[in-house]
């Protein structure tokens, strides 16, 4: 997330935010990219320079919050997608754990 404090907007998918490059027919665009370990986040930040400008939040979700599925790729074996239940807030479960990386 680029701006603080954390808000519900940070937990909206590309489809919910109606981003121009979003394919609303692609179910992954309705989910949020997540990594389940700190090492995986560091790896993603190495791959994607834009992520170095972000604050990283962590939290514990469970089956009452939504569905999570491994959506790994060769370059990101520890990538997952999380689809939170419609109009369900996970905001109280999260806090900032990493600040942007200084260049």
Image (cartoon, helix red, strand yellow):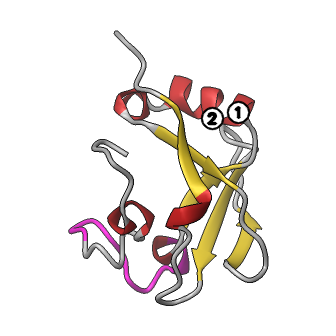
Tag 1 residue:
38
- The percent coordinates of residue 79 (x first, y second) are 68, 50
Q: Residue at 48% x, 77% y: name it.
A: 30
**What SS does tag 1 mark?**
helix
Magenta portion: prevailing SS class = loop
**What SS does tag 2 mark?**
helix
- The percent coordinates of residue 91 (x first, y second) are 50, 65
Q: Is residue 68 magenta?
A: no
Q: Pick the residue in front: 60 or 69.
A: 60
- Residue at the far left: name it: 20
Q: Residue at 74% x, 83% y: name it.
A: 64
Local packing at callout 1 (Cα closer than 10 Å; few below 14, some 14-19, many 20+) is few
Q: Residue at 40% x, 25% y: name it.
A: 100
- On screen, residue 21 versus residue 99, left or right, reads left
Tag 2 residue:
41
Q: Pick the residue in front: 84 or 80.
A: 84
Local packing at callout 2 (Cα closer than 10 Å; few below 14, some 14-19, many 20+) is some
Which stretch is magenta? 19-28
Q: Is residue 20 magenta?
A: yes
- On screen, residue 67 versus residue 50, left or right, reads right
- The quarter holding residue 14 reads bottom left
Task: In the rendered view, tell whether residue 51 sits above or below residue 5.
Answer: above
Whether residues under marks 1 and 2 lie with C-beta atoms below 8 angstroms apart, the answer is yes
Q: Which quarter of the figure is the C terminus placed in?
A: top left
- The percent coordinates of residue 23 (x first, y second) are 37, 76
């Amino acid at each position: 997330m680029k701006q603080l404090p954390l808000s519900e907007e940070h937990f909206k998918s590309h489809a919910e935010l109606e981003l121009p490059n979003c394919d609303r027919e692609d179910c992954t665009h309705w989910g949020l990219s997540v990594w389940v370990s700190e090492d995986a986040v560091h790896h993603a930040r190495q791959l994607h320079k834009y992520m170095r400008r972000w604050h990283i939040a962590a939290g514990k979700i469970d089956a009452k919050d939504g569905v999570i599925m491994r959506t790994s790729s060769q370059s990101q074996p520890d990538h997952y997608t999380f689809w939170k239940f419609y109009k369900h807030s996970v905001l109280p479960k999260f806090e900032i754990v990493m600040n942007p990386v200084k260049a």
